[in-house]
């Protein structure tokens, strides 16, 4: 899955059902950081929760039609933190708008990270050197 470079914020939320309408709550932090403005209209992309796969791990995966993540586990990257997520983690974007979540990082920091986890739509990186 490709994530647009126009991505303003990334957070998890539950969908609430009230009569014939459904709502999600936007975290206050997204408004406080200026990612979004109250009263404005935004396009929302929904990504399903991860589900446990039942395939045998020994079987090779067949290539899908979707592009592969532009990073690999163990890779070293230099990234700039552009935003802060719901849980306070730094968010950096690399090729094709792909998101790297960096715990304990602040907006504007440029850090050297090691990619520790890779998913189809985001990765997690640990800081190995600050102020690069």
Image: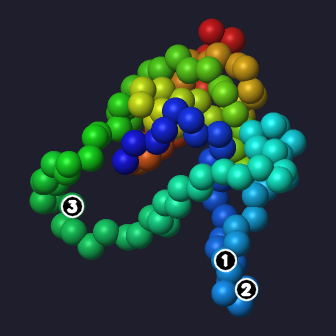
Q: Quadrant of residue 27?
A: bottom right
Q: Residue at x 56, y 21 (%)?
A: 79
Which element type, helix, strand or loop, lies under badge 1? strand
**Residue position for label 3:** 57
Q: Residue at x 19, y 67 (%)?
A: 56
**Residue position for label 1:** 22
Binning the other alpha carbons within 10 Å of mark 3 as few (below 14), some (14 to 19) or many (20 upward) gives few
Query: Residue 64 in the image: x percent, y percent?
Result: 19, 51
Asked whether disc 1 touches disc 2, contact meaning CB atoms under 8 Å apart, the reply is yes
Q: Residue furthest bottom?
A: 19
Asked whether disc 3 touches disc 2, contact meaning CB atoms under 8 Å apart, the reply is no
**In the displayed structure, does residue 26 sit left or right of residue 70?**
right
Q: Nearer the viewer, mark 3 or mark 1?
A: 1
Q: Earlier in the sequence, mark 3 or mark 1?
A: 1
Query: Residue 44 in the image: x percent, y percent?
Result: 59, 56
**In the displayed structure, does residue 54 sit left or right of residue 76?**
left
In this view of the protein, can residue 128 be seen by the observer?
Answer: no
**Residue position for label 2:** 18
Question: 32 or 42: which is nearer to us?
Answer: 42
């Amino acid at each position: 899955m490709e994530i647009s470079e126009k991505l303003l914020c990334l957070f998890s939320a539950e969908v609430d059902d009230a009569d014939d309408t459904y709502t999600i709550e936007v975290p206050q932090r997204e408004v406080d950081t200026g990612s979004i403005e109250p009263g404005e209209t935004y396009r929302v992309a929904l990504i399903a929760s991860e589900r446990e796969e039942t395939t045998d791990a020994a079987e090779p995966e067949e290539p899908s039609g979707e592009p592969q993540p532009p990073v690999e586990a163990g890779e070293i990257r230099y990234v700039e933190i552009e935003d802060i997520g719901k849980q306070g983690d730094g968010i950096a974007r690399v090729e094709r708008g792909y998101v790297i979540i960096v715990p304990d990082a602040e907006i504007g920091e440029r850090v050297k990270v090691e990619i520790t986890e890779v998913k189809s739509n985001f990765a997690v990186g640990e800081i190995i050197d600050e102020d690069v």
